[in-house]
Image (spheres, grey):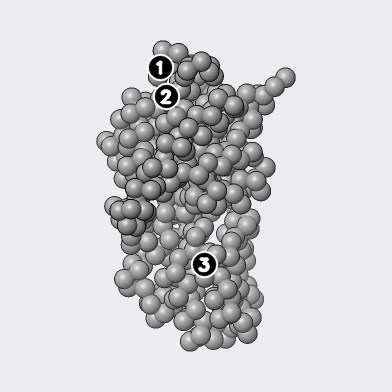
């Protein structure tokens, strides 16, 4: 029997892709009747991650309207939007999905809107307390919005808003349900540093200086540093001759790196914060200062206020300030344990399973349009 198709639209960064993958995995466990497809952009990390996860991926070139540039460049991008929208409509006609979930990213907006206008049951997932412009606008058209923070409810316009945690990959969720502590006797203090799927230049520069100015081997410190693609070769060259430090462009499988680490140094995007609470690791958060509405700082502060993390603003980030925090935590295992335990208590489990189960009920709600037809083509 031919399987029904559900579509998850979005990508660009791991913060959009991995929650979508977690929901797709949960859908596969709930029902054998559905085949989950992804729709993304050829410029995003979905081109690497989604095929590795084993899901079909369809690519649509969507102009990046919120990027800086000249007025002429912005006009060119805006002019390309109708063509992208037509391609979204064609793909919807070809696949005839039972539902579409937008998880954020460049392809999410046009494709989810096209699906809603064609009468396909649609929903969006919003990870931040301050929803972006696209999701605020889309919320008028979709049947349901899934939010993580209660503050987001006030800015979204869907009649059906549901508040869950952030869907986290199954392997990381499993760590929350098990004891993943690793004995520290007679081995170096292990630090995992990453700046998200794109890397973080401020962290990369700080870590390179730290490695040059400190003998980490004599301090009993070992570092795994994810750099992102842009800085990988430069950082890797800097670490030559430093046996206790390794640079990686990308981290996979992520749960293995979390399990290895005694301390995490990272940004504080919503998905990263959710993973930190899931694995229950002490973390030093360095929020991206240019994040919209300063939401990364607010995410980090939510944990710091519960003694579940340490906040180090990028304006205060230096080799000395970072090393001071590292040495303080290395010497105080009780403090590390308390921070990790407090973080673990904040994790909201089963978000992926709850969202997956509810996506299968979207078709039972009243359609947005009276019929599901555009022109002479029915879905």
Q: Are marks 1 and 3 in contact (CB under 8 Å)?
A: no
- Return the residue at label 1: 369
Please give the name of the residue rendered at 67% of the width and 24% of the height, measured from the top-left corner. 3
Residue 241 appears anywhere in the view: yes
Left or right: 263 in relation to 149: right
Q: Residue furthest top?
A: 370
Front residue (pair 331, 189) = 189
Question: In the visual, does 52 lie left or right of 258?
Answer: right
Mark nearer the N terminus (1 vs 3) = 3
The residue carrying mark 3 is: 230
Q: CA distance from mark 2 to mark 1?
A: 7 Å
Q: Residues within 10 Å of mark 2 (few under 14, many from 20)?
A: many
Q: CA distance from mark 2 to mark 3?
A: 39 Å
The numbered mark at residue 202 is none
Q: Secondary structure at mark 1?
A: loop
Residue 370: x percent and y percent?
41, 12
Q: Residues within 10 Å of mark 1 (few under 14, many from 20)?
A: few
104 lies above or below 307? above
The answer to the question of whether label 2 and label 1 lie on touching residues, with beta carbons closer than 8 A, is yes
Q: Quadrant of residue 369?
A: top left
Q: Is residue 19 in sight in this rendering?
A: no
- Taking the image as shown, residue 72 lies to the left or right of residue 363, namely left
């Amino acid at each position: 029997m031919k399987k029904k198709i559900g579509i998850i639209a979005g990508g660009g960064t791991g913060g959009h892709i991995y929650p979508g993958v977690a929901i797709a995995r949960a859908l596969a466990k709930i029902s054998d009747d559905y085949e989950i497809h992804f729709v993304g952009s050829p410029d995003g990390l979905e081109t690497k991650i989604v095929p590795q996860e084993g899901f079909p991926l369809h690519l649509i070139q969507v102009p990046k309207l919120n990027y800086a540039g000249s007025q002429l460049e912005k006009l060119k991008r805006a002019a390309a939007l109708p063509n992208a929208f037509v391609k979204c409509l064609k793909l919807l006609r070809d696949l005839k999905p039972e539902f579409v979930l937008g998880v954020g990213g460049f392809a999410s907006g046009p494709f989810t809107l096209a699906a809603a206008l064609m009468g396909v049951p649609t929903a969006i997932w919003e990870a931040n307390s301050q929803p972006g412009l696209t999701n605020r606008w889309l919320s008028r058209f979709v049947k349901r919005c899934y939010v993580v923070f209660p503050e987001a409810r006030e800015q979204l316009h869907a009649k059906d808003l549901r508040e869950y945690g952030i869907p986290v990959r199954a392997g990381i969720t499993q760590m929350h349900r098990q004891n993943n502590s690793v004995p520290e006797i007679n081995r170096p203090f292990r630090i995992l540093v990453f700046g998200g799927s794109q890397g973080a230049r401020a962290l990369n520069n700080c870590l390179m200086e730290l490695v040059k100015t400190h003998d980490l081997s004599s301090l009993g410190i070992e570092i795994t540093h994810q750099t992102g693609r842009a800085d990988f070769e430069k950082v890797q060259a800097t670490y030559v001759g430093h046996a206790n430090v390794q640079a990686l462009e990308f981290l996979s499988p992520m749960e293995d790196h979390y399990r290895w680490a005694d301390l995490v140094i990272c940004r504080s995007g919503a998905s990263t914060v959710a993973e930190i609470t899931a694995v229950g690791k002490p973390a030093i958060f360095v929020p991206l200062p240019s994040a919209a509405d300063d939401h990364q700082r607010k995410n980090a502060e939510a944990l710091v206020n519960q003694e579940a993390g340490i906040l180090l603003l990028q304006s205060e980030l230096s080799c000395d300030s970072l090393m001071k925090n590292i040495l303080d935590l290395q010497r105080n295992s009780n403090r590390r344990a308390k921070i990790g335990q407090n973080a673990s208590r904040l994790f909201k489990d089963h978000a992926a399973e709850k969202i997956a189960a509810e996506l299968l009920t979207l078709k039972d709600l009243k359609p947005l349009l009276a019929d599901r037809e555009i022109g002479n083509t029915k879905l």
